[in-house]
Amino acid sequence: MDLKDKLLASFMAFEEKVDVTSELHDIRMAAIKNFELKGFPSKKEEAWKYTSLNSILKNDFSVFPKQDNAVEFAEVKRYFLHEIDTYKVVFIDGKFSSFLSSTTHDKIDVCLMSSALNKPKYKDVVDAYFNKIASGDETLTSLNTAFACEGAYINIPRKKIADKPIEIINFSTGSEAALMVQPRNLIVVGEGAQVQIIERHQSLNANPVLTNSVTEIFADERAVVDYYKIQNDNLEASLIDNTYIEQKGQSHVSVHTFSFGGNITRNNLNFYHRGERIESTLKGITIIEGKQHVDHYTLVHHAAPNCESHQNYKGIFGDRSTGVFNGKIFVEKEAQKTDAFQQNNNILLSDKATINAKPQLEIFADDVKCSHGCTIGQLDERAMFYMQSRGIPQKEAKALLMYAFSNDVISSVRIPELKQRITKIIASKLGVKMGFDL
Amino acid sequence: MLKITNLHAEVEGKDILKGIDLVVNAGEVHAIMGPNGSGKSTLSAVIAGNEHYEVTDGSIELDGEDLAELSPEERAHRGIFLSFQYPVEIPGVSVTNFMKTAINESRKAKGLEEMPANEMLKLIREKSELLEIDRKFMSRSLNEGFSGGEKKRNEIFQMAMLDPKLAILDETDSGLDIDALRIVANGVNKLRSDKNAIIVITHYQRLLDYIVPDYVHVLYNGRIVKSGTKELAYELEEKGYDWIKSAHSEVM
């Protein structure tokens, strides 16, 4: 039985356990039908031209883990931003770990999707926001929706400011030979409210893991949301991240994606504007080697006047690693005075490394400022010699140049401890010890 | 200190240096002058170990050690410093962080501990004052958006920080107005001692009014064709390079 058939069969079993009279049931049924019709995406589709899932789909993934697994905090402490106090929503093999988590209902809700989907007190929010922007066309999002039952639920009401960052961490223990998990997060940030969120997927051993994650974020008027994705997983872990963001007037949402490790990583990041004077920031650093693959597929949909979007993606590719950057900016006729900027810079460290970069600008308004730029190059030899002539060894000089290259993405991280952590991860990837933090 | 013997070097198959002999002793300042394209910058790059150039014959020794197999950083650790004619912009790395890294890497290579932070700050303060550099400058990205004069001053600031045995100043005077030239030359002069040596590469005699050389060499067509004392520089200033060119032109 291939994975698609297995998932369809599992869905039947899964549905028996849930309340078939709920509206959720209808949403799930529609979603599984879409997946049944379309199946997994293939390279024949334009959006998946450079990313093939075939090599991972042949694994015999367990869709529901057979047992509850626990991990000790000491074992996983290093994956948390433990230098500071944070709210934590932690899942182990797709199941909530109350032991590792630190949730709250004090002024803000930082808790579980399973509660939100099942308890009456969340019904209004769920009815208003759940599955409202997650694209019904996208087959992998449909697959996630069909099985949606667990993940993080965050609701920051009007004018509230989350008093500390929130970490959403999904661990997989490898107790199954191969595991597929489908976290589903819903984040609602009210008018003038603010929140910082860090998301991470971490496999704790070498058994294959496939994560098909969907996150919906709603930023109401003047809301400020900073979202950080740390992707530094092991070589058998693949991630398909589908993030959908809807912004209302004057809201600011930024998403930073740090892709340093994993087998195949696909980031579908979609921004939809529903108001004026919105700012959207999409930034990413990718540093990979071996045969790793990272694909950034971004969409910013400008639908109203006077909005800005800034995209800045940097990639450093070693060995036979491959990268994809597909950045789509859509400017509707009404979206006059749009300021949309897209920059994608890449360094190839080896002759065998590949980057496929494709900007897609579809502009229907006539008074806009849209620009895009893409560079692919090697490390600057003149700069290398300059640094070496000052006594900085080649390896360190290389690392310093790569830091410098990534710096304008790192510098906009607004949690200092996270910025330090990112810097350290980069240093360890480059095998150097830096005498300072950028 | 520095002994260059019959040095030949080429770049992309083209001979640039065609047999250079030069001896520089501790405490001395040597000026190397010559028209454009004579090989001055190539000579400085080859001494500093730029792998873009290939040494095809001859040798460079520092304190009796052949430098042929040494990387640019190893040469730097042994006390060679090159002030670049065109310093490279490195966005994202501040002057301070760059200097910290350079100094501590050199110390590491010598088996020393990292320099304590307060000592580093003191050194930076002292040397930036010497070059009349504003402290705010230190947190700017290295050479990014610096004016020509600022870049050159920053080069000499780095020289002061690293305290090299042999400093090569490649066209340090180009792009400097008279005030900046004075500051730079003053900085260099304060760094002179009987333990170090300086090679000043320049097109014009102007800088040599401030940094007075013990010896002046004329490089032309990849060879040192004339050596003398500082008076030679005045002669070149007066007569230009044409008399050198005509005396040494090769039959085409």
Image (spheres, rainbow, N blue to C red):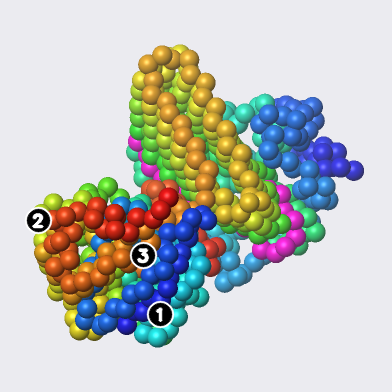
**Quick check: is B106 in the magenta stretch?**
no
Report how far apart the C-alphas of labels 1 and 3 lie in the structure: 18 Å
| Residue nearest the observer in this picture, A411 or A400 | A400
The mark nearer the N terminus, 2 or 1, is 1
Residue name at image x 32 percent, y 70 percent: B81
Judge if badges 1 and 3 mark residues of a common chain.
Answer: yes
Q: Quadrant of residue A192?
A: top left
What residue is shown with label 3?
B223
Look at label 3 and name its amino acid. Answer: Arg
Report how far apart the C-alphas of labels 2 and 1 lie in the structure: 36 Å
**Quick check: is A196 in the magenta stretch?**
yes
Query: Helix, strand or loop at disc 3?
Result: strand
Look at label 2 and name its amino acid. Answer: Asp
Look at label 1 and name its amino acid. Answer: Glu
What residue is shown with label 2?
B179
In the rendered image of this protein, does residue B54 appear above or below residue A112?
below
Query: Helix, strand or loop at disc 1?
Result: strand
Q: Quick one: label 3, few (<14), some, or many (20+) residues within 10 Å?
A: many
What residue is shown with label 1?
B61
Residue A231 in the image, given as x and y percentages of width and height = 57, 53
